[in-house]
Amino acid sequence: MTSRRPQAVAVIVALIAVLVSGCGWHGLNSLPLPGTAGHGPGSYEISAQLPDVDTLKQNSRVRVGDVTVGSVTKIERQGWHALVSMTINGDVDLPANATATVGQTSLLGTQHVELAAPKGVAPQGRLTAGSVIPLSRGAIFPTVEQTLATMSLLFNGGGLGQLQDITKAFTTAGTGREDQLRSLLQRLAEFTKNIDAQTTDILAATDSLNNLAGQFADQDPVLTKALQTIPNAVAVLSEERTRLTTVLDRIGTLGALTAESVDQTKRAITEELKHFATVLKSLADAGPALTRSLGTMLTFPWPAETIDNWVRGDYANATLVLDLTLSRLDSTLFTGTRWEGNLTELEMQWGRTIGQIPSPYTADNPLLAPYRHDQGP
């Protein structure tokens, strides 16, 4: 009976452990083990974001230098990286910008989390309860497997065994081309020197490009709104495609009519210019007469070149003929009016003719036509 008591105690302890851990039993490492560091008075919990935890387990050690100061309490996935929770002793004094690295104690040793002050950066603040070391300050040391794989690649297929072949190939390629290789090296040196001399310009161009990228970043809301608006505008244009096509067709028709109108106007203007050329030619032919007629403008109705022939001192020789016959008054004053020919007909009734037989007003020869009583004396 006494020999079965230890077995019963072990079973009871296992059942209690299972009940305490609920349904998340993952072995003894899933339970807080006694004797691990970081659980004493004043201990506090921190977290670290790590790119990879490899074979790191719960209850793994947390070390500062070579001293164990705590233990891992929980490992969970956070996005594309791991979030490791750990408790450390209260007397651990680390800056707030401390780093966390997953490392291995020895070649065949266990993995642990190494906490350390940052290198190349001044310490800031103090690591306290609830602090989270970000992913930018988390890392993992190369594992034994990675080291052996790298060495295998280097010695077997990494090119170290082919170094002699590569050297021989370079020697063969350079034999007889020493001057060309020397010239090439000189040109490379000159090119490198020129690049170095233009470092300031390259940096300035990089800064300008950076400023341009910043301006684009500042205009991100405008660009986003434009990108959201352009599809709607394209959809409206697609819906109005038929109307736009009709408008373009009508514009083409209008262009054809305009071209035809311009051609017709061109021909008309050409014809007018031809006629105008005839008028100008006639005006040019009449130039001498037109020039001579200008001499009459100031002395009208007497020409200026003959005015000395009839002006003598204070007197002027003139012959004046006044024709006050009815026919002359008729042709002078009433031609083209409703009274045209009345005075002439009256004069002819009185016995005077104009010299036309027959007269356009009597249709008879007044010398041969019979006399009427109303003809006059």
Image (cartoon, helix red, strand yellow):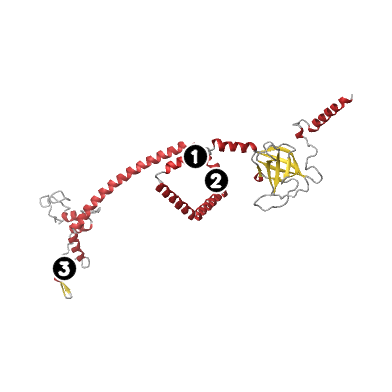
Badge 2 vs badge 3, beta-carbon distance below 8 Å? no
How far across and down, in percent of the image, does residue 340 sit? 22, 54
Q: Residues within 10 Å of mark 3 (few under 14, many from 20)?
A: few
Mark 3 = which residue?
A: 305
Q: Is residue 170 above or below residue 368?
A: above
**Which of the marked residues, 1 or 2, is nearer the chain's N terminus?**
1
Q: Residues within 10 Å of mark 1 (few under 14, many from 20)?
A: few
Side of 349 where 132 appears, left or right: right
Give the farthest residue toward the bottom: 313
Check residue 164 in the rendering and tell me which mark sits there, or answer none: 1
Q: Quadrant of the N terminus?
A: top right
- Identify the residue at horizontal 38%, vertical 40% (top origin): 252
Badge 1 vs badge 2, beta-carbon distance below 8 Å? no
Check residue 149 in the rendering and tell me which mark sits there, or answer none: none
Q: Quadrant of residue 9?
A: top right
Side of 199 where 348 appears, left or right: left
Q: Is residue 145 above or below residue 176?
A: above
**Which of the marked residues, 2 or 3, is nearer the chain's N terminus?**
2
How far across and down, in percent of the image, does residue 143 sit? 65, 38
Q: Is residue 322 above or below residue 343?
A: below
How far is mark 1 from mark 2, CA to CA?
58 Å
- Between 66 and 37, the residue placed more toward the observer is 66
Mark 2 = which residue?
A: 223
Label 3 residue SS: helix
Q: Residues within 10 Å of mark 2 (few under 14, many from 20)?
A: few
Query: Which of label 1 and label 2 is nearer to you?
Result: 1
Badge 3 vs badge 1, beta-carbon distance below 8 Å? no
Label 1 residue SS: helix
Give the farthest residue toward the top: 1
**Which of the marked residues, 3 or 1, is nearer the chain's N terminus?**
1
Query: Which of label 2 and label 3 is nearer to you?
Result: 2
